[in-house]
Image: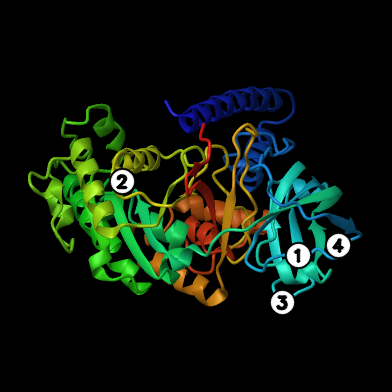
Amino acid sequence: MSRKQQLLKRHRRNKRIGLLIALVLLIVIGVLVAWWLPLVLAVLGWIAHEAWFADHLFYSPKDDYAYSFPPYTPQPKIHLDGERLRLDDGVMLVDDATLVLALRIKSTWLGRFIDPAVELSGGDNPDRQTFERGANGLRYLNLSGQAQVLSRGELRLRGRFCRVLGEPVLWAFEQPDYRRQRVMVIAPHADDAELAAYSLYSQADEAWIVTLTAGEIEAEHYQQIGLNKVESARLKGRLRAWDSIAVPRWAGVPEAHCVQLGYFCLQLAAMQAAPSRPVGSREAEMDDTRLFRQLNPFALPGDTDGAPTWNNLLADLRELLLRARPEVIVLPHPTLDPHPDHICAQQAILEALRGLEWQPTTLLGYANHLHDNDRWPMGDAGHGIALPPAFDSSVPMQPYCLPVPVTLQRDKAMALGMMHDLQPRMPFKRRLRRLIQWLLASRVTPLYGENEFFRKAVRRQELFWLLKHGETSAKQN
């Protein structure tokens, strides 16, 4: 069982215990006070839960985030003078540096009910970065894109439903412009490349998009048009295979550089456990990947027999790596992203690279999911991305942040809108929850689409983590 599954199991157990205690209390109140009072309290309790306690947050908002960055990372001296951030005299920042500011925030009483945020102002790029309700501890702001206004001493920080405390600490990470290199994005499912790296791959001199699975499961939406479970899964797989090939064309990626490998969703771990054993689809009643690979621009080793095996996956990846010779590979982060297919995708690339004659110079990790906070990045679409919760300072982390201008944010939103898996309406319960949170917690509905990923992914930055650069690999836990 993964850590994410363990956290969910504990959360659900605690919720059941809480509901049982609440039920007993309501019964007692009904007996001792009035029969109708428990009904009113139950409705109010449910509304309060949907407004303020429905987030999956598996840590205390009072916990300090704990990051360690590589030794010798430049730390320009900085001070908080009232609301204004001031660098020491003579300190200048590189425009495209990734800037991370550590500071303490403490939520006000309203910040327990409305998401607290730190607002950045003073230049041409005002921003707001949002944290957990009730946050009270060390957090890491992303100041990337604010180098000029910060160098001029004009950047201001103001807490919204929170106070900014203590003396801040600034890190400045300088990296090459990876857009000027050959980039290959590894997507476990159609839409992962767009969610994580649309800005990066759309601006790269040369880009490849490699999608590992068809993403055919959980196709209930298509049963509404009269298909059975198997037919729905096959249709969804074909649609998402099309998405993985077609949508990158919107960003200018040539068709010859878009590849769908057609393995089956949530089956990569079973394939890895027995590398030569075929592992069929959970819902589509298929054990041949070739239905989902028909749009590929060239043949791959796995096309010979269509067997969904780990060995075929590795052979496909090695062929693609030698054909594309990417200098930068963008793939799921090995510890931040808990999705089992994402973990296996990262491990498959590392295994495929082992002993291969071509080696990339850089590995960049991304996280489209987190273990302990399903809402991250918090806040609204169009805002900046603060660093995610992290509590193991023994593992050095090195962020790389790419700015996403508004025009590119819109293009990214349109790319996500083309993805069939992000198009269906949310279930009624989620729409009702979103309405309650809008009314009581001031949470804004995403402009570009109902799906939560339109809020999470359409942002001022794309955030990556440097896993390997040159001959130096970052430590992984």
Residue that appears at 75% across and 45% down: 112
Can you give x and y, in whole percent of width and height, for residue 189 in the image? Answer: 33, 51
Q: Nearer the viewer, mark 1 or mark 2?
A: 1
Whether 161 is drawn above or below 444: the answer is above
The quadrant the N terminus occupies is top left
User: Mark 2 touching mark 4, by CB under 8 A?
Assistant: no
Question: How much space separates mark 3 and mark 1, taking CA atoms?
Answer: 10 Å
Write down the residue under mark 4. 86
Relative side of 208 to 117, left or right: left
Q: Tell me which numbered mark, 1 or 4, is placed earlier along the sequence.
A: 4
Residue that appears at 46% across and 30% down: 5
Q: Tell me which numbered mark, 2 or 4, is placed earlier along the sequence.
A: 4
Q: Nearer the viewer, mark 1 or mark 4?
A: 4
Question: How much space separates mark 2 and mark 4, taking CA atoms?
Answer: 51 Å
Q: Tell me which numbered mark, 3 or 4, is placed earlier along the sequence.
A: 4
Q: Secondary structure at mark 2?
A: loop
- Residue 34: name its quadrant: top right
Nearest to the observer: residue 384 or residue 329 = 329
Nearest to the observer: residue 183 or residue 110 = 183
User: Mark 3 touching mark 2, by CB under 8 A?
Assistant: no
Question: How much space separates mark 1 and mark 4, taking CA atoms?
Answer: 14 Å
Whether 376 is drawn above or below 297: the answer is above
* Mark 4 surroundings: few (<14), some (14-19) or many (≥20) residues within 10 A: some
Amino acid of disc 2: Glu
Residue 309 appears in the rendering: no
* Mark 3 surroundings: few (<14), some (14-19) or many (≥20) residues within 10 A: few
Label placed on residue 218:
2
Label placed on residue 124:
3
